[in-house]
């Protein structure tokens, strides 16, 4: 018995070791960094312990801008991408013939490199004194005035950022939702048909509850993914996101560590912990809401 | 509401797309199901019985032929316009809704002039629940109930709109043996009480025989025989029907008709004055054997199974490829390695060796 217990721990050791070194230790370290005031990474010294780092970060206009950007991104892209993905999956489910082809087409963004796609978006939306991108060419065609989406007004940049994010996250959601829709027992739909159930009612009363666990999964992972956005923004607006006004919370953390103003691990840690707190809060809210609306078979 | 099927045929394209041939699931089905009766569609899997049910329901449309409810031609009506209720083998209860919500569901679909007030809907739902005796479980969810109770909920949901016709697809297959017995009585009772013309599909002949007013035996899309259960059992039109009905199944021997007698091996077992001399299959029901030391048919005994009320004798004979099972009164004591039987003429049928159609012996 004792021997067995020892063996059990032995088998777990490699995983525990890795988790400890690469997960637990850094996590604890981040909390420690965030509390060390005036930490100097060169001399490895600090003045004292307190919440000053948090106060600094929360009063930093760059951080507040990053929070605003991130929140807007989350609030816009998660519902839009999930809704659109659901719509496309429903349409896919209703065209058995070309489904395979379209499924492949819709999945392509998932296997494409983020930076390459970002470049394509930049070219599509750009406006320079010499040439306009295709979107601006289209706007001009319909008599509108061209907009600099990459280096212009905030709303234009936000629009591109949201469009891009939606486009990038959709394939995975479509994949999940198509299989979720396919796994609903067709007998439910047959009975509903015999009972003369209107289409919209079938959707809201049968389809949605049946696939609600998958929708919930996508919403949770969508929220977390959008809160962690960074590389997509770099792909669109370059590395100096603060200058572009399009920084995200993760981008702020990165800048504090390595950017032009880098070398502030304490501020970075504080910002990272604030992000963690936000994500945790949102996830808990999601879980509470889901209790009433998600039905596990 | 009587249901008439006139030359109904349903063909499906072959599953293998390259194969252009079609699969005929139902072939020229013509029958009139009388009003207010319980009809069992019976046959092995793949015989077209479920397709027939779907055709009546409207989930499938026939390739050719017409379907009438009463005098009304419903062939081109979609299922929601036909006024039918259906129960599937897996019940298809909505798992996220309570029993009451499940039963209310069809009523809430009514629109326009048919729309009911909440009070009326609730009354109707409770009435349906009372009919199937699940009034105590209205607030439960389907997964909190036994299979038999779920079955009742599904029937209540199918009945709540007072359909003209009730369709049951393998209604008992998901239940254990005890519940199956109980539930089939229940289906019979509900059908009697409501008087709704009911059609159900089953592969279990005992189920079909025990509760149906008439049974339709099908094989590979073709109707083999239609009639009252006892009539079909007693007078099967061919060897397939004879084999398909009855547990234990009919015992089949190779035999011949010669000199106005039916022969199995060297034994003349029954007179057959009306039949021409030919080789035949002889089907003998298990209850057709009577132990008699002077009987013509001698079998080797393998085992004697005591079942209380009667005794089952497992034996073999050179003319029968499978084991023979005879059910005899428990008073008869079987000893020794062989047993001799005489046969009850009503329990013996002869079938043509190629067409397998029944041949009249007398």
Image (tube, grey):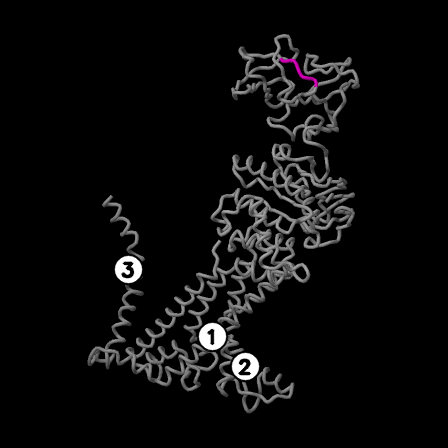
Precedes in sequence: disc 1 or disc 3: 3
User: Residue beneath label 3, please?
Assistant: A17
Cα separation between marks 2 and 3: 46 Å
Cα separation between marks 2 and 1: 26 Å
Precedes in sequence: disc 2 or disc 3: 3
List x then y, in percent, for residue A95: 64, 61
On the image, which quarter does residue B329 sit in? top right
User: Residue beneath label 1, please?
Assistant: A75
Query: Horizontally, is B50 left or right of A156 in the view?
Result: right
Q: Chain of mark 2?
A: A
List x then y, in percent, for residue B206: 61, 32
- Can you tell which mark lies on residue A123? 2
Number of labels in the image equals 3
Judging depth in this view, the residue of A179 and B120 nearest the camera is: B120
List x then y, in percent, for residue B281: 70, 23
Q: Are labels 2 and 1 on one chain?
A: yes
Rendered residue at 50%/77% (across/down): A162
Query: Horizontally, is B94 left or right of B12 in the view?
Result: left
The secondary structure type at the circle numbered 3 is helix
Question: Given the current orientation, which residue lies at the most extreme top position?
Answer: B294
């Amino acid at each position: 018995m004792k021997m067995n217990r020892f063996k059990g721990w032995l088998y777990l050791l490699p995983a525990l070791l890795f988790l400890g070194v690469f997960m637990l230790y850094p996590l604890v370290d981040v909390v420690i960094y965030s509390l060390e005031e005036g930490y100097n990474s060169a001399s490895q010294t600090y003045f004292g312990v307190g919440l000053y780092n948090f106060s600094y970060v929360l009063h930093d206009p760059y951080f507040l801008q990053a929070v605003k950007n991130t929140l807007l991104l989350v609030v816009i892209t998660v519902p839009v991408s999930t809704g659109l993905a659901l719509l496309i999956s429903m349409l896919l489910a209703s065209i058995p013939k070309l489904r395979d082809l379209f499924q492949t087409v819709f999945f392509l963004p998932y296997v494409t490199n983020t930076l390459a796609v970002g470049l394509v978006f930049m070219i599509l939306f750009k406006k320079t004194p010499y040439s306009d991108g295709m979107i601006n060419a289209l706007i001009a065609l319909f008599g509108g005035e061209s907009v600099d989406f990459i280096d212009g007004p905030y709303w234009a940049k936000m629009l591109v950022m949201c469009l891009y994010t939606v486009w990038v996250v959709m394939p995975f959601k479509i994949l999940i939702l198509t299989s979720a829709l396919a796994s609903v027992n067709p007998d439910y739909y047959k009975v509903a048909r015999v009972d003369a159930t209107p289409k919209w009612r079938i959707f809201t009363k049968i389809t949605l509850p049946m696939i609600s666990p998958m929708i919930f999964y996508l919403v949770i992972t969508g929220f977390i993914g959008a809160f962690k956005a960074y590389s997509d923004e770099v792909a669109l607006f370059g590395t100096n996101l603060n200058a572009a006004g399009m920084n995200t919370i993760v981008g702020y953390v990165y800048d504090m560590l390595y950017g032009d103003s880098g070398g502030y691990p304490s501020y970075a840690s504080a910002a990272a912990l604030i992000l963690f707190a936000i994500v945790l809060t949102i996830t808990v809210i999601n879980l509470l809401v889901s209790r009433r609306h998600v039905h596990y078979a | 509401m009587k249901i008439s099927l006139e030359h109904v045929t349903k063909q499906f394209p072959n599953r293998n797309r390259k194969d252009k041939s079609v699969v005929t699931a139902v072939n020229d089905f013509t029958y009139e199901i009388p009003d207010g009766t319980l009809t069992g569609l019976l046959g092995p899997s793949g015989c077209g019985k479920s397709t027939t049910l779907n055709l009546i329901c409207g989930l499938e449309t026939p390739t050719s032929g017409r379907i009438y409810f009463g005098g009304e031609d419903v062939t081109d009506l979609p299922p929601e316009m036909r006024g039918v209720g259906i129960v599937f083998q897996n019940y298809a209860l909505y798992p996220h809704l309570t029993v009451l919500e499940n039963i209310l569901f069809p009523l809430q679909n009514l629109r326009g002039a048919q729309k009911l007030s909440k009070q009326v809907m609730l009354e109707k739902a409770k009435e349906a629940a009372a009919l199937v005796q699940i009034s105590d479980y209205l607030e439960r969810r389907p997964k909190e109930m036994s299979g038999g109770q779920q079955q009742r909920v599904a029937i209540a949901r199918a009945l709540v709109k007072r359909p003209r016709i009730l369709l049951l697809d393998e209604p008992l297959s998901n239940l254990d043996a005890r519940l199956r017995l109980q539930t089939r009585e229940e289906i019979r009772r509900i059908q009697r009480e409501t008087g709704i013309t009911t059609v159900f599909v089953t592969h279990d002949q005992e189920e079909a025989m025990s509760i149906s007013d008439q049974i339709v035996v099908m094989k590979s899309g073709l109707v083999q025989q239609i009639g009252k259960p006892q009539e079909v059992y007693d007078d099967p039109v061919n060897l397939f029907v004879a084999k398909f009905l009855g547990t234990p199944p009919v015992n089949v021997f190779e035999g011949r008709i010669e000199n106005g007698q039916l022969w199995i091996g060297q034994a003349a077992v029954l007179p057959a004055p009306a039949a021409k001399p030919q080789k035949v299959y002889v089907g003998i029901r298990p209850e057709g054997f009577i132990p008699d030391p002077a009987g013509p048919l001698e079998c080797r005994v393998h085992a004697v199974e005591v079942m209380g009320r009667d005794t089952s004798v497992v034996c073999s004979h050179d003319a029968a490829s499978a084991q023979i099972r005879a059910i005899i009164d428990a008073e008869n004591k079987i000893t020794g390695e062989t047993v001799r039987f005489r046969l009850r003429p009503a329990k013996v049928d002869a079938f043509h060796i190629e067409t397998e159609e029944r041949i009249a012996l007398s």
